[in-house]
Image (cartoon, rainbow, N blue to C red):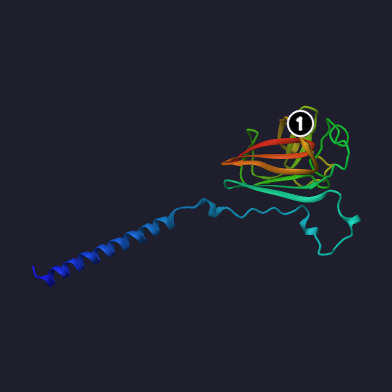
């Protein structure tokens, strides 16, 4: 074989190798692009404060500011969104549970409108199923154990419990003692994998709820 023929052959082998490598790279890119990314189906987390439509650009004097200001907290757990919308009463030196909030009576953990829970998928709360949807939240405080209620009527005034016939779920929950929290606070102190803890706390007491999503 002549030197020219040998060089041409080597050049041909090189071109074939380059084309093969390029084809392989294109195939890998296509396969990667075709993989389904579940996070693309999830909408951004949105936590709109309660009564956000009432918010005005007007600057108001201090004496017109609500005593229990509107708030919301949202958490994405895997591909499930959970949003709590509520108003935040302040302790202001008052004795809370067993006094301002009587034991044995229905109370929404909030003020003004009833606190609401919105969930985008079916979940479990303390091991019990709760279908996706919106619920008002209510409690019956007691010294050692609380009843936590999720009611199907989401839109309610804070003193107008819709009645147990519309309850979607009732749970018995043991509260825990915490350092003083001046303003009622909902939070997600633990989020790991498909599990989380949703907790509300006020004064020296917190009520934790275990959440599990699909």
Q: Which residue lies most toward the bottom here?
A: 4
Residue 7 is situated, as x and y percent measured from the top left of the image, at 16, 69
Residue 201 is situated, as x and y percent measured from the top left of the image, at 76, 39
Q: Quadrant of residue 153?
A: top right
Identified at 39% across, 59% down, the residue is 30
Residue in the foreground of this view, choosing between 116 and 146 = 146
Residue in the foreground of this view, choosing between 46 and 201 = 201
Q: Which residue lies most toward the top here?
A: 144
Q: Which residue is mark 1?
A: 146
Q: Is residue 71 above or below residue 1?
A: above
Q: Is residue 191 above or below residue 59?
A: above
Residue 143 is situated, as x and y percent measured from the top left of the image, at 80, 28
Residue 6 is situated, as x and y percent measured from the top left of the image, at 13, 68
Residue in the foreground of this view, choosing between 113 and 177 = 177
Q: Which residue lies most toward the left here?
A: 1
- 41 to the left or right of 170: left
Identified at 86% across, 31% down, the residue is 98
- 96 to the left or right of 76: right
Q: Which residue lies most toward the right here?
A: 63
Residue in the foreground of this view, choosing between 201 and 125 = 201
Q: Quadrant of residue 181?
A: top right
Identified at 79% across, 45% down, the residue is 114
Quadrant showing the C terminus: top right
- 28 to the left or right of 147: left
Q: Is residue 189 above or below residue 58?
A: above
Q: Secondary structure at mark 1?
A: strand
């Amino acid at each position: 074989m002549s030197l020219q023929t040998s060089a041409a052959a080597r050049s041909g082998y090189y071109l074939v190798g380059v084309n093969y490598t390029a084809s392989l790279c294109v195939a890998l890119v296509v396969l990667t692009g075709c993989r389904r990314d579940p996070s693309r189906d999830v909408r951004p987390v949105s936590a709109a404060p309660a009564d956000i439509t009432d918010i005005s650009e007007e600057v108001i004097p201090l004496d017109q500011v609500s005593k229990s200001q509107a708030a919301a907290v949202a958490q994405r757990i895997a591909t499930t969104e959970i949003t709590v919308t509520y108003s935040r009463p302040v302790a202001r030196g008052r004795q809370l549970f067993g006094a301002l909030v009587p034991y044995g009576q229905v109370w929404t953990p909030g003020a003004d409108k009833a606190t609401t829970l919105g969930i985008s998928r079916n979940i479990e709360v303390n091991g019990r199923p709760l279908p996706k949807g919106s619920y008002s939240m209510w409690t019956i405080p007691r010294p050692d154990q609380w009843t936590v209620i999720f009611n199907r009527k989401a839109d309610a005034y804070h003193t107008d419990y819709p009645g147990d016939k519309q309850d979607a779920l009732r749970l018995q929950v043991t509260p825990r003692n915490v350092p003083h929290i001046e303003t009622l606070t909902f939070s997600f102190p633990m989020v790991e994998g498909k599990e989380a803890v949703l907790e509300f706390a006020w004064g020296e007491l917190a009520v934790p709820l275990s959440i599990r999503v699909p």
